[in-house]
Image (tube, helix red, strand yellow):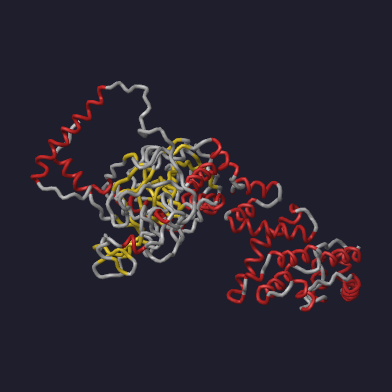
Amino acid sequence: MSNYRIHGATGDWEIVVGLEVHAQVTSNAKLFSGASTQFGAEPNTQVSLVDAAMPGMLPVPNRECVRQAVRTGMAIEAEIHKWSRFDRKNYFYADLPQGYQISQLYHPIVGKGALTIEADEKAGIPEDRTIGIERIHIEQDAGKLMHDQHPTMSYVDLNRVGVALMEIVSDPDMTSPAEAGAYVRKLRAILRYVGSCDGNMEEGSMRADVNVSVRRVGDTELGTRTETKNVNSVRFVMQTIEHEAQRQVNVLEDGGTIVQETRLFDPGTGTTRSMRSKEDAHDYRYFPDPDLLPLELDDEFLEACRASLPELPDAKRLRYENELGLTPYNARELTADVEVFARFETLLGETASAIGKPEAKVATQVANWALSVAPGVVKSLGDEADVSHGTAARQAAILKMQDAGEISGGQAKEIYEIVLKTGREPDEIADTEGLKQVSDTGAIEAAIDAIIAGNGDKVEQYKGGKDKLFGFFVGQTMKAMQGKANPAVVNQILKDKLG
Amino acid sequence: MSVTREEVAKIAQLARIKMGEGDLDHLVPEFNKILEWVEQLGEVDTAGVEPMTAVIDQKLRLRDDVIDADPKTGGGRRDDVLANAPAAEHGFYGVPKVIE
């Protein structure tokens, strides 16, 4: 449990949050027709006669959409229902030509599962928490309405009609905005690892309905909840919860009651408002779709789904910690998203083979480079950086020189800056720009001899037990070498000479 | 089981079917007669019988994930799908403004 509380005038309140996430299934064609799902096409060019609900057209489910829903269910260790069925959810709206959405109310394809959100002290999540997932079902998306193109008409684009969605319904297990944010991020990571949804929230591939209620600390009964629809970013999910919980506390403390209703989030103000809706808007009159037989899955299909699952975020994170020896922080950051770990693993492979050491021996160096050094350089260069120049091979070449002691950390950064600006090769840059450390013991010894000769008093003090002076000698040597001396070599020679 | 006049009016409204008082006068008893007739099925003992999902024993067919494999169920036919629209403009369906 988090200790997130709303401090009301009459006492403290805790909050209860459940999320319904709609995730667009990654597929070429729609759930029940052969029309394309490609985002951004000309209006109504990806609408089949099935999607337009022409009389006599029959839906035939897309095997890939079924497969992706099953794989997603397996990734959250959920029960997979070998027998499920499609139902009609009836309502009239201009974005829904059928007059009903084909969904799965009574017999969803995926049953109970769970995912774990990791402790994050800074975000107010003191310990790992398991969030229950009640179900995942597959259903059709609706079309898109545009209201600002014509003075008296709304324009309807049905390209999105019939695209497959997974509705992923959590249990009301979250107790703070931070936990809800972590849940959405984790779910998004799992979907992207599995490849069942691209998780692109800007394009609407993932959106959440946010259920919030409040109760006095210590109460066991759930309060009346509200549902805020179609929230399309992690930050907005968190803002919705903060605002909605505070609003409910204000209403209750003023002696009012919470109405179970649908609300809308306004990203401009960070607030929610009630959707004006007709009384019978929620009378969906669900019934089994007579156009579709039950969906029955056999063991062979399920086994193929299971065999196709990649290493998932939790397993990967543990492997990074246990086998690569990364810190828990680095392991978590590197496994948070598909692109991040893919880049890391490519660079790790390149670096290990360039240096000729096992991956575990260079993993920490590569992780620090990938998480902090390289992004820092890119950020400092801003528009000057062309990240396409920063290939894994070039980054590995820099890390190899650093590993061999040929360049310092600072020089590695400088070389990478030039790589990103020009696309030149790191070895050539190090040579021509003089960005190499001097490991030549002769030159370093000469510099050290001069410093020892010129600082007789300090040498005496050091030998008399003032160990801290060692740093002074290192500093002087580096200064004499214009910062280009290999610190390891400097340390060694100083130790030898100072005895 | 039977339905009231209010329920029939509501069902009609949900289905966007305009229904006058005269229509309701004869539809309510008609609905109830149908329900009564169907209710005879309740006399059969169905304990332990699986609900039937289809008259013919067959499996649900699935389609491959291929775009426009069959032109009859594929996209790319905007002119066809818009052909019956009362107001097709700029490739969109035009409908009376439906903003809340």
- A341 left or right of A410 in image: left
A48 is higher (above) or lower (below) than B62: below
Toward which corner of the image does residue A355 lie, by quadrant? bottom right
- A279 left or right of B63 in image: left
* Residue A78 image offset from top left, x and y in percent: 51, 39
* Residue A304 image offset from top left, x and y in percent: 57, 41
A484 is higher (above) or lower (below) than B84: below
A360 is higher (above) or lower (below) than B61: below
Q: Looking at the image, which residue is at 17% across and 41% down?
A: B8
Toward which corner of the image does residue A237 lie, by quadrant? bottom left
Q: Nearer the viewer, residue A271 or A299?
A: A299
Which residue lies most toward the front here? B71
Q: How many marks?
A: 0
Q: Is residue A258 visible?
A: no
- A29 left or right of A43 in image: right
* Residue A446 image offset from top left, x and y in percent: 90, 74
Quick one: quadrant of the C terminus of chain A?
bottom right
Q: Is residue A6 visible?
A: yes
Q: Nearer the viewer, residue A310 or A100?
A: A100
* Residue B84 image offset from top left, x and y in percent: 27, 60
Q: Nearer the viewer, residue A424 or A160?
A: A160
